[in-house]
Image: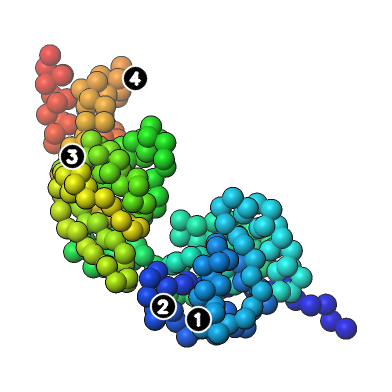
Amino acid sequence: MEAKTKGKLYLCPTPIGNLKDITYRTLETLKSVDLIAAEDTRVSLKLLNHFGIDKPLTSYYEHNKREKGSYLIGKLLGGMDIAVVTDAGAPGISDPGEDLVRLCVQNDIEVEALPGPCAFVTALTASGMPTGRFTFEGFLTVNKRNRIKHLESLKFETRTMIFYEAPHKLPHTLKDMYSVFGDREIVLAREITKKFEEYIRTTLSGAIERYENVSPRGEYVLILRGAKPEEAEEALRQDLPDPSELLKKYYKDGRRGKELVKLVADELKLPKREVYDIYLKLDKD
């Protein structure tokens, strides 16, 4: 008798608010697997009951991912097919599903990701912000110092930036963003696909003022405009060594003329003519 082959892990996106957004393929997969690993089994049970799906459920979330990950890998190695679902959206996005996928890769277990609902993609496409290039930053840490450090690393990011945020943390996050980025454009998308879906297009100062008078409600996706290219270029130039000092350094090492100018221009990504003019002035002095 042949030994049973390994099972497969299916990443199954679930609706982020409107049950009609679930795909036929996701429903078929949930019906066919041997086990469903859910972020919150109570939430997932309501979804399964709605669509008449009766399958064993087990929990898999941030605080049990280490021990439960080993358990699920054992089941997969034994030939069981498993679906992973979150409370809403795509497993693996700001979710411990990414850790389970990594374990599967390490154990040569096949992983199949199904397309479907994803909050940040939905919010970005409707935001009116540039979509050609963007960076997804997920949830910011609750630790203020680390949160500021994270934001400062993005101060001169020119791509559109996307964050997830909970309502009780939103006012603090907006103030921290304002302190780092200044008064940038922002879109706050809330309750996406639900009855009270709303896109608030404003500035960081406008958003701060708004939530001084109104309590935030629902989960938020924040779409923040990136830095202007000229601001990023200027910041980069300020961080570079002084061309004069670099010319002097390499001059002492015995470099001269065109070789010296080319070396400094390449290192600092400056026009050769600009570096040459500085070189001539130094040489004259």
Q: Are marks 1 and 2 in contact (CB under 8 Å)?
A: yes
- Mark 3 packing: few (<14 Cα in 10 Å), some, or many (20+)? some
Between circles 1 and 2, the one closer to the viewer is 1
- The Cα–Cα distance between marks 4 and 3, rounded to whole angstroms, is 43 Å
Label ID, residue 253:
4
Rendered position, 271 above or below 195: above
Between circles 4 and 2, the one closer to the viewer is 2
Is 281 positioned to the left or the right of 126 in the image? left
- Foreground: 254 or 174? 174
Residue drawn at point x = 14 percent, y = 47 percent: 206
Is 141 positioned to the left or the right of 230 in the image? right
Label ID, residue 50:
1
Label ID, residue 19:
2
Residue drawn at point x = 34 percent, y = 20 percent: 253
Q: Quick one: label 1 or label 2, which is nearer the N terminus?
A: 2
Between circles 1 and 4, the one closer to the viewer is 1
Name the residue type under label 1.
His
Q: Position of residue 205 (x, y in %)?
A: 16, 44
Q: Which residue is mark 3?
A: 182
Tell which residue pokes out farthest to the top in this image. 285
Residue drawn at point x = 30 percent, y = 23 percent: 250
- The Cα–Cα distance between marks 1 and 3, rounded to whole angstroms, is 46 Å
Is 211 positioned to the left or the right of 120 in the image? left
